[in-house]
Amino acid sequence: MHAQNAVEPVRGVPYGRSVMIKAGGPRTVGVPSPEARLRFGAELQELGGGPRRRLLMVDDEPAFELIFYCGSCPLLFRRLETANEKLHLEDMQERLGGPLDDPDDNGVIEAFGALLPEGEYLPLLLDVEPRRVIPGKEGDYFSGEQVTAWGIDQFWGLPQYPHTPYYRTFETVVDADAHLYEFVVPMVPPTWNERRRVEEYVALMERGTVPTAVAISTLNSSIACELQRCIA
């Protein structure tokens, strides 16, 4: 999710819906950070300098470059060349073939929590209608709303490019100067999906069965403002 404050209200297009089914209580799950298959980290500058990039790491390989926690940086998620793992749990495949009544049904939290660094997490069960977006085409946040709020990248002279298709699921006006956007970003491109498994999901949904997907979520908040106002 990304919360954005803009100089002027951003005109958004509603995408699907996101309905809360059930929220669990905060709970501690995960393994020691060095053992986690998926974790957040930072790439340092050479010669002991400060952080160069904020990263989502998978099996100790950089998978995505992410927005820094600077408060005024535009949203960023960019797939990197080493992002080639799905984090697929074979024994959970059938358990997620239908809807859940509770976030912890079928041991989902315990199983996927073992992939994460130890910490406190809030389990949520949502009903969403994702809409796939291709970067640079209609509905792309980076070449649409982000350009309206921040302008194009000053170095490249182009909008940010995430190097992956992604999904938009929900957005809403928070107040006159703030907007909330929700994105779902796949670990690998949809073209990498197993065709047989996709066809199985299609058949399930045609019969009225809604499969379940698992995601780890973060919330970023950014303020888009004129340079002199940011410095002040």
Image (cartoon, rainbow, N blue to C red):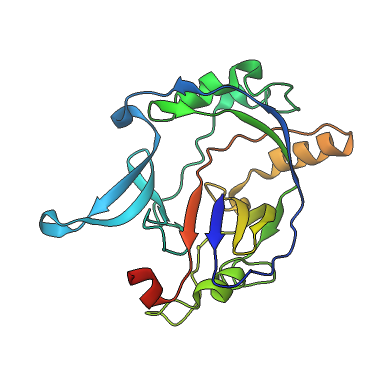
How far across and down, in percent of the image, does residue 64 sit?
A: 43, 52
122 to the left or right of 124: left
Nearer-the-camera pick, 204 or 78: 78
> Could you tell me if residue 75 is visible in this image?
no
Is 66 located above or below residue 142 in the figure?
A: above
- Report the residue that reaches farthest toward the left: 47
71 to the left or right of 132: left
- Report the residue that reaches farthest toward the top: 106
In the rendered image, the quadrant that contains the C terminus is bottom left
Nearer-the-camera pick, 141 or 82: 141
The residue drawn where x is 33% and y is 71% is 231
The residue drawn where x is 55% and y is 69% is 146
The residue drawn where x is 55% and y is 55% is 3
How far across and down, in percent of the image, does residue 218 sit?
A: 50, 43
Nearer-the-camera pick, 224 or 143: 224
> Could you tell me if residue 28 is visible in this image?
yes
The residue drawn where x is 69% and y is 55% is 172
65 to the left or right of 44: right
Is 74 located above or below residue 204 in the figure?
A: below
Quarter occupied by residue 157: bottom left
Is 220 located above or below residue 7 in the figure?
A: above
- Report the residue that reaches farthest toward the front: 232
How far across and down, in percent of the image, does residue 98 sit?
A: 75, 27
144 to the left or right of 99: left
Quarter occupied by residue 5: bottom right
Nearer-the-camera pick, 135 or 183: 183
